Image (cartoon, coloured by chain):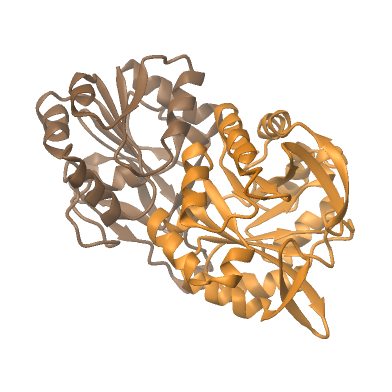
Chain colours: A orange, B brown
Amino acid sequence: MLAKRIIPCLDIKNGRTVKGINFEGLRDAGDPVELAVSYAQQGADELVFLDINATNENRKTLTELVTRIAKQINIPFTVGGGINSIEDVSILLNAGADKVSINSAAIKEPTLLKKLTKQFGSQCIVLAIDTKFENDAWFVYLNGGRIKTNLRTPDWAKQAAELGVGEILLTSMNNDGTKKGFANTITQQISELVNIPVIASGGAGKIEHFRDAFNIGKADAVLAAGVFHFKEIEIQELKKYLKENKIEVRI
Amino acid sequence: MIVIIDYGIGNLASVLNMFKKVGVKDVIISGDKEEITRADKLLLPGVGAFDTAMNNLEQSGLIPVLNDKVLVQKVPILGICLGMQLLTKRSEEGTKAGLGWINAETVKFNLDPALKLKVPHMGWNYIKVQRENKLIDTQSKNRFYFVHSYYVNCFDESQSLATSNFGTDFTCMVNKENIFGAQFHPEKSLKFGMKMLENFAKI
């Protein structure tokens, strides 16, 4: 049986791991490669690296980092942040990334998703959605949560799935950094709406939150950053707990 | 020398990195006919779409060389993921003929919606090895990393080396003489996958 996945996320700024609260207030959280190796050893199923300070100038730094990571880890990893062209994707995949996550660029130009999945295959194109609940609806945000769009999250998820993306990484801005649990309602809604895997993200604080994201949110994978970086939750312990709660995980 | 075949598709560095990590040093990435002619083992990686991959292989002009290496000289070859699917006769994903070295076709997961399974089959799954072979222990209790929407359906059951289950049992490794294929990614499957690459290097 296919295991539910636990995915530590490393936010990258200028080659270092950082962790923010509600998309702001950054703290340094160590060397990405060291952390990546350590997570793989502890039982992480995949890793995600998000360049939160992506610009053309530091794209080279990110590519070099990806090359270093690929030499060291033997589990799959996704890279995201500021990716907006076929060329960007090609460079990162060639550097050793297994998947790339696309966010703002896809909102501005949805056909980009179709071009990317056709060229590289659905399996390596992840759509990242930053979403916020406001006035009774979930809206899509872009530019790292700085700009609101009028897109409703379920509509966007459905459209992206039709354009061929292989997976959706759904981050709730209301929950991110709060440690109060994942946004299970919207996660469940998206998960049941699209027939591709959905990764729940934002809000992990306790091991029970992960259980709920799988059981209530119907997530296929769960992503978290701070609780792993600051060793508040150990991956092995988390998986043991999930297994005891009848959730299929890889131990 | 192991040659990881470069035909302009996929993530080639990862496989190379993992061979190096298990101490296999004589490995190169190449799409050069001369170098492939000198290879004593071949690795056919691949991600993306079936037709794109076959087009690239055809345009590279490598198919006659590969046919000679694999079918006449019987050099061991391992196809990974899409690389395994290319070993079959055809795929529902495209219209082009595959390499046809394995008596099989590649088909799309067509699962009962009631199972609520998401395609791509993405993540870590168990495999069941059908018979003794040089790559993997028949008692393997480990999970391997998969990411695919199509799978190989063998016409000749004896060529199905291992199966996995995702709503249905499907072939996740093929083998016929010197030809091997793995649907999962050994290079992304921790030490268990690395062991497989190490074993392949020793054949």
> For residue B161, what is the image quadrant?
top left
> For residue A138, what is the image quadrant?
bottom right
Direction from residue A34 to residue B3 in the image, left or right? left
Along the viewing direction, whichever of A174 and B177 lies nearer the viewer: A174
Direction from residue A48 to residue B121 in the image, left or right? left
Along the viewing direction, whichever of B147 and B8 lies nearer the viewer: B8
Residue depicted at x 75% and y 71% = A147
The percent coordinates of residue A131 (x first, y second) are: 74, 70
The percent coordinates of residue A169 (x first, y second) are: 65, 60
Along the viewing direction, whichever of B200 and A212 lies nearer the viewer: B200
Farthest residue in the front direction? A57
Direction from residue A195 to residue A15 in the image, left or right? right
Task: Tell me if residue B76 comes above or below residue B92 in the rendering.
Answer: above
Along the viewing direction, whichever of A178 and A80 lies nearer the viewer: A80
Farthest residue in the bottom direction? A136
Q: What quarter of the picture does the C terminus of chain A occupy?
A: top right
Is residue B125 among the parts visible in the rendering? no
Is residue B139 among the parts visible in the rendering? yes
Residue depicted at x 83% and y 58% = A23
The percent coordinates of residue B136 (x first, y second) are: 40, 28
Q: Tell how many labels.
A: 0
The percent coordinates of residue B3 (x first, y second) are: 30, 25
